[in-house]
Amino acid sequence: MRYTDEAGPSSDSVLADLDAAALSYATALSDGPDGQRALLRDRFVAECLPFAGRMARRYRGRGEPLDDLEQVARMGLVKAIDRYDPERGSFTAYAVMTISGELKRHFRDTTWAVHVPRRVQDLTLEVNRVRMDLTASLSRPPAIAEIADRLGATVEDVTEAVVSSAGHSPISLNAPTMGTDGAAELGELLGDVDRDLEAVDDSITVAELLLRLPARERTMLMMRFHGNHTQADIAAELGISQMHVSRTLTRTLAWLREAMISDTIPRWHGAGVPSESLAMRVSTCRTADGITVRIIGEVDRDSADRLRAGLLHAVRAAAGLGRLTIDLTNMPLIDAAGLAVLTEAAELAEPPLQLVGVQRYVAKVLAVAGLDSHVADRP
């Protein structure tokens, strides 16, 4: 191409030999007036645009639009033209290096979805190139060690490059899964049900209920279930008997279970009451229908004998006065020994005795012992 001071280029607008065109451009630029420099540059850039397009098409098929690649290649072309010095060699070679560098920099800096160090990015490109070459020569996919041997790199570096390559174009979590016709997304297939999340509501409820318990009961629960102490350890720490610890934990857990499933929080029997007042007591009174026995406190093997004496006396007294009624309103706990006493009294009473004021968790124990048929509403 021959550059002149005229408004447009000569009729021979496209030259195959860019080196000759570059020399002609450099000569015209040095000999021409300063006012024509911008026009000469624009003409030479327009002449070289097809060359930049061919360079851009070498990198197509790598996930980037061809229009973007051509834009980057043209920017590299302008840089090559502005920095071109005829005394330093071929323009074509210099332009190839400059445009290729711009294209590689574009892939390195803008096309990775996840930030990866430049060293790993460059190694990833080399690993992909060597993998294709080895696959063609070996007729099989190459091993990591074979790629590392060809590149002169370590297996660890090649493995890091292979893993990092997944960060170039990750699959969207909103991508439709194969074979579902878009009915499901990839993100719906990842992860698992968080069982701990389902227990959040229960954990919050239990935490609020624990604040309603006396300090001693809270301490026992913490030592047993958080500190993993045995009942004997708790008893030694608090200076009470192991049986008392067992009864207290049973009563506390029963109250927590009832509170968890109830719409209203049940009354805590024993809250603010000294432990001595929880000792079992039996009182008997005459009513219009017969004899009523009131049991106050917990019934276990230590207090079962006292309960037996009181109930047998009441059974004999009620024989000529009417029905025997046992009021369990203030009995929060009963064990096997106490159930045996109630069963014995039920067998001896005539007419059959009735149980009133039964708490919910005590009623479950009575049902297991077969005494639920004697439970009646409180008169």
Image: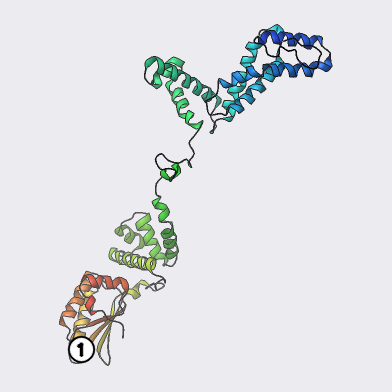
The residue under the point 59% across, 18% down is 55
The residue under the point 52% across, 26% down is 62
Task: Write down the residue under mark 1.
Answer: 318
Q: Decide which of 44, 205 is in the foreground and name it.
A: 44
* Way the structure is coloured: rainbow
Q: Is label 1 in a helix, a strand or a loop?
A: helix
Q: Position of residue 308 (x, y in %)?
A: 20, 78
Depicted 21 relative to depicted 100: above or below: above
The residue under the point 39% across, 40% down is 179
Q: Is residue 217 visible?
A: yes
Q: Is residue 302 visible?
A: no
Q: Position of residue 202 (x, y in %)?
A: 41, 60
Q: Decide which of 321, 263 is in the foreground and name it.
A: 263
* Snapshot quadrant of residue 27: top right
* Snapshot quadrant of residue 97: top right
Q: Position of residue 158 (x, y in %)?
A: 45, 23
Q: Position of residue 183 (x, y in %)?
A: 43, 46
The residue under the point 58% across, 26% down is 66
Q: Decide which of 169, 273 is in the foreground and name it.
A: 169
Depicted 354 relative to depicted 222: above or below: below
Depicted 19 relative to depicted 58: above or below: above
